[in-house]
Amino acid sequence: MIGFLLYRTGRMLVTLWVIATVVFVATRVTGNPIDFLMPEGLDAASRAEMIAYWELDRSVLEQYLAYWAALARGEFGLGFMERRPVSTIFAERIGQSAALLGTTLFVTIAIGVPVGVLTAMWRRRRAGSAVLLLAFLGYAIPNFVLAILLLLLFSFWLHVLPSAGSATPLHYIMPTMALSAYFIAALVRYTRNAMLDVLGQDYMRTAWAKGLPPHIVMLKHGLRNALIPVITVIGLQMTTLVSGAVVIETVFSWNGVGDLLVGATLRRDYPVLQFGVLIVACLVIVVNTLVDLAYAAVDPRVRLA
């Protein structure tokens, strides 16, 4: 296990270096942020002074080396627009994004896995076919389209839910619905297929022949052996969930990291964008590592391997 963790840590560091380098280069080939920071008609002297203040007059290599030197010291720079430390800006917003992502993930697992198991049990019933139809619809509708439809229905027509912000529990309903619909649909399908593969196994027939209660057979013998592909899907969904949250936070004016990254991209706010991408990359890598560890916890064959 120690060797596995050391190997994954080395891969994580290499991946973060590649991602940080790509983002560093990509942000600097899109234009000069001074064009967005300063008003039109700025005189040449003031413009040169601002460029020197932000050290944008240095070569790309010098900026790259200074960037990594600052990261090594734990310094992430100042945001161009807010003139505040990037870490402070993200600290004010990351809690809102974490709350939305956590709520969405909880709803996705709490609904997707049980419904997937029930759909496998009802595979010859109309109820199972109806659930699959709803799953395909949820899988096909983009989350931003569903978000707009929810806004029209619950805010514009019915006036029962707030359309923007994150101040009260009511603000969580529509963003969570818009984010989780796609992932619930995908999880239902994968859980159903994994359960169908398990139901035909010999140990399942043996469990039924012993006269065990249905919930013991389905959960202890069936679902546990079907969890490997389900855990894989959940891990992939957690990484996709982060990118989906960027769009949803923008639609609902959610005061989170996603909305911050969209604004930083449009305004070419290099420090904010670089730090945000690093945070997202770290989150994805950590999730993938936790998924691998979950394999070993669920399946003894993985531990032995």
Image (spheres, rainbow, N blue to C red):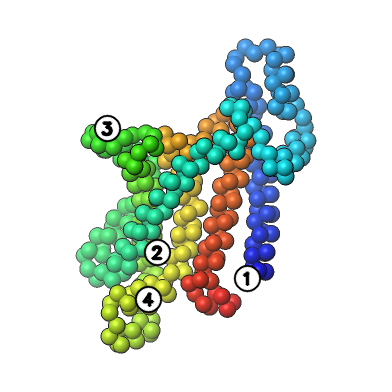
Q: Secondary structure at mark 1?
A: loop
Q: Earlier in the sequence, mark 4 or mark 1?
A: 1
Asked whether the residues under the numbered discs 4 and 1 touch, taking CB atoms below 8 Å apart as contact, a structural biologist would say no
Task: Report which residue position mark 4 lands on.
Answer: 220
In the image, what residue type sits under mark 2? Tyr
| Residue occupying the point 42% across, 75% down | 225
Q: Dot 1, crowdedness within 10 Å: few (<14), some or many (≥20)? A: few
Q: Image quadrant for the C terminus?
A: bottom right
Mark nearest the camera among 3 and 4 is 4
Q: What residue is pinned by disc 3?
A: 156
Mark 4: secondary structure: helix
Determine whether label 2 and label 4 are within 8 Å by CB: no
Instruction: Return the residue nearer the eye: 125 or 105.
Output: 105
Determine the CA span between mark 2 and mark 4: 18 Å
Image location of residue 165, percent across then percent down: 39, 34
Residue 26 visible in the shown view:
no
* Mark sitting on residue 190: 2
Left or right placement of residue 255 versus residue 128 in this view: right
Query: Residue 1 got which mark?
Result: 1
Distance between the alpha carbons at the discs numbered 3 and 4: 46 Å
Going from N to C along the chain, the mark reached first, 3 or 4, is 3
Viewer-nearest of discs 2 and 4? 4
For the residue carrying disc 2, how many other residues have a C-alpha within 10 Å: few (<14), some (14-19), or many (20+)? Answer: many
User: Does any portion of residue 10 appear in the rendered image?
Assistant: yes
